[in-house]
Amino acid sequence: MRHMASRRQILTLLGTLGLPLSTMTDLLAASNDPSAARPLRVRTITTGLELSPRGESPRLEDALKFLAAAKRSFVNAGYEVQTLRIATNPWLAGASPADRGQVLDRLRVLDKMLAEHDVILGLGPVLTEDRADDSLAQWANDLIGTTKQILFSVVIASEGRAVHSAAANVAAQITEALARTLPGGVGNFRFAAAANIPAGTPFFPVGWHRGPESIAIGVESASVLEQVFRDLQPGDDPTARLRQRLDAELTPIETLARDIAKEHDRTYLGIDSSPAPGKDRSIAAAIEALTRAPFGSAGTLEACASITAALKSLSVTTCGYSGLMLPVLEDPLLAQRAGEGRFSVRDLLLYSSVCGTGLDVVPIPGDTPVHAMAALMRDVAAMSSRLRKPLSVRLFLVPGKKVGDMVRFTGEKYLTDSVVMQLDQ
């Protein structure tokens, strides 16, 4: 009888959210069976800490221990955790070229420690001022070519100065250099240009930290969106239904993260509600479930806006982007639709006006000139500043490939095959 009473209480609670009976039953089953597969993954547990050029190894070691404990808590609660990450303050942003070079050896040692614990480190932006720096591209090449776990960014827009034109050119130079650093241009997976990205963003490469040591969560929830939209009934409000379902899914994650933060004396920053996709969980499929048309068709922009409205109105504490992600090389259906010519880079930029993270892992021709990439980055920076929203640019310059060529990323865990897209010049 005690079990039945608890079941009724849970159903009553879920019913107040207005969820369909099938969804309530699924959630109830998951609550009774911690080992049941969750409908979303935890893409990242990210802890933030401030460092200085001295390194402060003990604090990094404490962060590694904290992340391991946090992962155990989430796994024990039935969640799949994909990555563990450390975000730092921009402690290299003010370094001279000589000082940056001297730090490389320390970063290589740190990278080995990170690899042993399967943890990713975000250095944050290494350039925050709007100025030229001809040394950064070579430094980036040396860093990415000799490490595996470290990512970084360059600021191309900030609240104090709308568009960092000179810095956008530096970011384009880095993109060009990293295209040659690793086979297939995959070095650019670990770099992005950042426009008005707030501290506490758990997603990399643009994530960075400021303040007390913290915890933030990023989720991979594209399949939740797809299920919600497939279950819509005539007259249903997709934004309202999605908000209800995401609140139901994210509230237990927030409760757990808050408990972990309290136990380990860290600040809880929130959940980046961006519905990150994966190779088996497509954001394009979710949008097509709503529009009933291929991604890129008329109605796609409206769908993006509807999803964003839900992401921005959740009851849980949110942080970071908390917007719709459209990463071409991380979503097989997005890549397929790009190959079919259903959307362009400019379309992705248009969709970013009502959602998203900007231009993420977009494959472009290997001979794209620096000035064309810089111009596109300035466009994103201008949009970010005008709309007061965080956006980023992560371009995949693919060596030896031209528009329409197929690029394959054999052995890359998170990247899918795609055609090379046209970048207007």
Image (cartoon, rainbow, N blue to C red):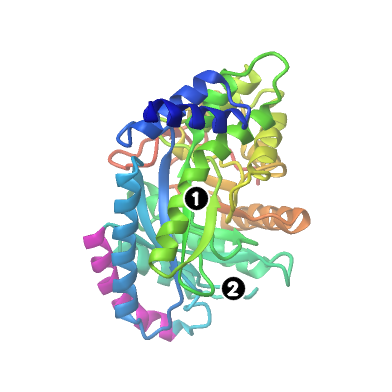
Q: Closest to the observer: 258 or 301?
A: 258
Place of residue 255 in the rendered image (x, y in percent of width and height, measured from the top left): 48, 51
What residue did someone put label 2 on?
Answer: 128
Instruction: Say if 41 sits above or below 28 in the image.
Output: below
According to the image, label 1 marks what residue? 254
How many numbered badges does the structure rendering display? Answer: 2
Confirm whether the magenta stretch covers residue 49: no
Q: Quadrant of the N terminus?
A: top left
Spatial distance from mark 2 to mark 1, Cα to Cα?
Answer: 31 Å
Q: Where is residue 337 in the image (x, y as percent from the top left)?
A: 54, 26
Lateral position of residue 41 relative to residue 145, left or right? right
Instruction: Specify start and end residues of the magenta stretch as a single range.
Output: 98-117
Indicate the amino acid at tag 2. Thr
Q: Alpha-carbon neighbours of circle 2 within 10 Å: few (<14), some, or many (≥20)?
A: many
For badge 1, the amino acid type reads Glu
Disc marking residue 291: none
